Image (tube, rainbow, N blue to C red):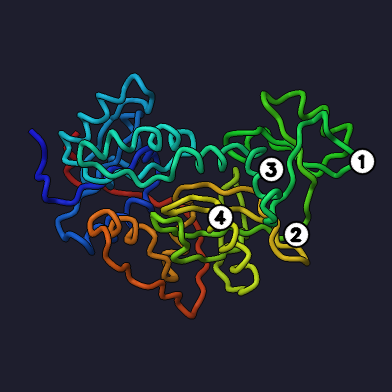
Amino acid sequence: MPKNSSQLTVLVTSASRKIPLIHVLRHAAQQIDPRARIVAGDIDPEAHARYVADEFWAMPKTQDEDLPALVEGCRSLGVGAILPTRDGELSFWARHRTTFSDAGISVIVSTPESIKRCLDKLEFAHWGLSNGYRVIPAMRPTAIEGDGPFVVKERTGAGSKGLGLNLDAVAARAHAAKLDDPIIQPFVSGPEISIDAWLSGTCAVHGLVLRWRDQVVNGESQVTTTFRDPVLEAQANALLSGLGVSGPVVAQAIVTSGGLAVIEVNPRFGGASTASIAVGLDSLLWSLLEISSPGTNLPEFNRHDGEVRQVRLPQDLIVHDPDF
């Protein structure tokens, strides 16, 4: 039988080890409904998120042939909202969000067109440059001109996958030959930042926070510090407003003497985006409010005056009397 449909129940997909996300999502959901429940979903039945969520679902893969099972599973769990968290599944949820909407389930995801533009690094670079935004150019290996230095990466997938940095033209071509679908970009030196933002269903930026990527491991910030810069914030706002995305997003960029040089935009909640929540970017609350109270005015973005440094650390969890 379905769970209580009047109770706010949010499914986090690809929950894996995303424990901080589950904590901040629960806090956001319980501001709307004190009885709110968080369901952690993952294809791995031993995903660590099962120990901190209110319920765990060893869910089917996000593939078209499993769509009926996914819809039925959500309905039986009483899920009213879904938060996808992995790049590789965003296209699936975007394509089928109408099907879930018809079943009374809202998916926090951008349109298929904007997701494709973001996930295809070559298309994103061409779109950005053609619209006058400050993005780093991208090309096929056959289009290399000059001696470099260059960055080589896969056209789709995680930005750190198969990454080659600061390579001359010969080394860049050799590295590209090892990848499945490579692109090459000019190497831009400078400090790297993340940009967390939330955009409404009409693709308007409601709030935005910059943070330094102080220490990066496997493409994710392990130490990150929030900061303010009106020029960089305005440049980021302009690009994101034109991109056509909605909900929580996180962008990566290099800070240069002329401002931002944007690397990519991921149309989802980022691994270290909890730091931005700590300074007032209530992206998860706004997403849930937009779903639960459509048409109402959202709380304004109240950017806190102080800054925070977030250090992502492993932490032991002791479970008493577990029901295994």
**Is 83 rendered above or below residue 212?**
above
The residue at which mark 1 appears reads as 147
The picture places residue 231, in percent across and down from the top left corner, at 65, 72
Q: Residue at x 73, y 41 (%)?
A: 138
Report the disc number at residue 242. 4
User: Is residue 319 at all visible to an observer of this figure?
Assistant: no
Q: Nearer the viewer, mark 1 or mark 3?
A: 3
Task: Give the SS element for disc 2.
Answer: loop
Q: Are marks 2 and 4 in contact (CB under 8 Å)?
A: no
The picture places residue 220, in percent across and down from the top left corner, at 56, 48
Q: Would you say 129 lies left or right of 107 here? A: right
- Sequence-wise, the earlier of marks 2 and 4 is 2
* Kind of residue sitting beneath label 2: Gly
The residue at which mark 2 appears reads as 190
Q: Residue at x 46, y 48 (%)?
A: 268
C-alpha gap between disc 2 and disc 4: 25 Å
Q: Residues within 10 Å of mark 1 (few under 14, many from 20)?
A: few
* Kind of residue sitting beneath label 1: Asp
The residue at which mark 3 appears reads as 126
Q: Residues within 10 Å of mark 2 (few under 14, many from 20)?
A: few
C-alpha gap between disc 1 and disc 2: 20 Å
* Kind of residue sitting beneath label 3: His
- Sequence-wise, the earlier of marks 1 and 2 is 1
* Kind of residue sitting beneath label 4: Gly
Give the position of the N terminus as an image quadrant.
top left
Q: Residues within 10 Å of mark 4 (few under 14, many from 20)?
A: some
C-alpha gap between disc 1 and disc 3: 22 Å
